[in-house]
Amino acid sequence: MSMRSQVYEWSNLAPTGQTSSLRRTVDAVPVAVPTNREYDIFIGGIGNNITKPAETTATQFIVIEDIACSAYLGGALQVRINTTDYFQNPDVTDQAGVPGLASPYPRGSSNDAAADTLEDYTQLLKSFDLYPDVYVLPGQVFQILYSLQSTNVATTQTTVVAAFVKYTLYDGPDALIANKLLELGVTINPNNVDWYKRTLIEQQQRSRVAAVATNGGSA
Amino acid sequence: MSMRSQVYEWNSQTGTAATSWSNTNTGNSVSIFIGGVGNNITKPAETTATQFVVIEDVAVSPTAFMPSATVAKGTTYRGLIAGGNGSAGACNGVIGNRAYIQVRINTTDYFLDPDNVGNDGIPGAASPYPRSTNFQPCFNLYPDVYVLPGQVFDALVTCYQNSAFGSSVATNALSAFMKYTLYDGPDALIANKLLEMGISINPGNVDWYKRTLIQSQSAAPAMA
């Protein structure tokens, strides 16, 4: 299993009295997310986090295929590879990234988190597709940064916000092939990795047949 | 019929009172096949020496997120129940079970966090079951998951929200779904061959391999 579809879901839910936790906990409560600041969904110190920054080892290659976040409160997601932000303004200045309105999570959720209008809501569809995909090369660190423009804290309530990333992890020999495809300028996806494997096998078979022919029919 | 599309649906409330989902299960991963909760089968799901399984989709009940303290526990929103600890008071803003589904092959979890630690799997919010205009998928299990001959496979559901599972099959508040293709006999051998060749295993490619074999066989007598 050296090509694996992977997902990571983050939300600002943490045990009562804490702002974050490793992995998830039962009946966690929403915590405040300061506005206009970017928080790494992996190790940002809010909600469910993991033990260390997300990075690829020397034998791994990651292709990020989709990102999405809550569509309300002006939420947005940015992808950062090492220190470089992926989404930029046309004048090459920083921006927040893909708005939750363009790539909502969950799909079909409302653009208004207020619960007092349970019968009156929209069901958002995505208007953004992360294509071409984002490549994380061996040894690189990647961050998915969530930010919101409006506060998620009111007098008596705190709004739950969430983010989602879907990626494919290529490991071992398949990561080497992914690197080779990158050199060749071929899009990295499971089909093309399989195509490259088939090409290698066919080449080996041809050279074996040629060697037999050279030796006068004996292997 | 040696290639067969198969499905398995699990509902947490189809068992007796003793075997239906309760808050004691929240936070623990439960097998949808032999977990002792809801509808189960007689033995762990496994392939025989002449079978090959390709898991193509997994899904679990969805979750909605909203402000805390605005919905009372027990309120229904988009078909989901507002749960949480205790039976009264306001919900924490998570509507539904906050459920996840993980695929396990033998003892290895398929879905990992970026720190290479096994996680809870696919969120129901990303791969909802059932799908609706309210809850649409943003996850596609591609590449598929292969279960080779002789391997044991499992799907584990984990929930993090108490009291959101409903009380009967009719409420259908916590369920899971798996879609897979079972290759048996000669088709399982072909599936193994395709795996060796680095070709995706699907019914189209298995048929393509059969056609190739037939063509090479029919070409051989003509040469003789």
Image: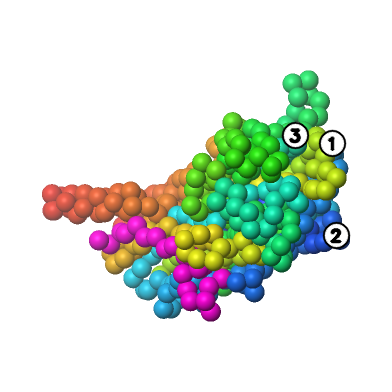
- For marks 3 and 1 on the same chain, the one whose residue lies earlier in the sequence: 1
Q: Quadrant of the C terminus of chain A?
A: bottom left
Kindly report which numbered mark, 3 or 1, lies closer to the viewer in this rendering. 3
Q: Which residue is nearer to you in this view: B62 or B190?
A: B62
Q: Give the distance between the C-alpha atoms of the residues marked 2 and 1, in whole angstroms.
A: 21 Å
Name the residue located 63 percent from the left edge and 54 percent from the top edge. B75
Q: Which mark is residue A36?
A: 1
Does B90 sit left or right of B109 as displayed?
A: right
Whether residue A88 is visible here, answered yes or no, is: yes
Do pointers 3 and 1 mark residues of a single chain?
Answer: yes
Q: Position of residue B146 (x, y in %)?
A: 46, 61
Applied colour scheme: rainbow
Name the residue located 85 percent from the left edge and 60 percent from the top edge. A18
- Local packing at callout 1 (Cα closer than 10 Å; few below 14, some 14-19, many 20+) is some
Q: Position of residue B145 (x, y in %)?
A: 49, 58
Question: What are the residue bounds of the magenta stretch?
Answer: B1-21
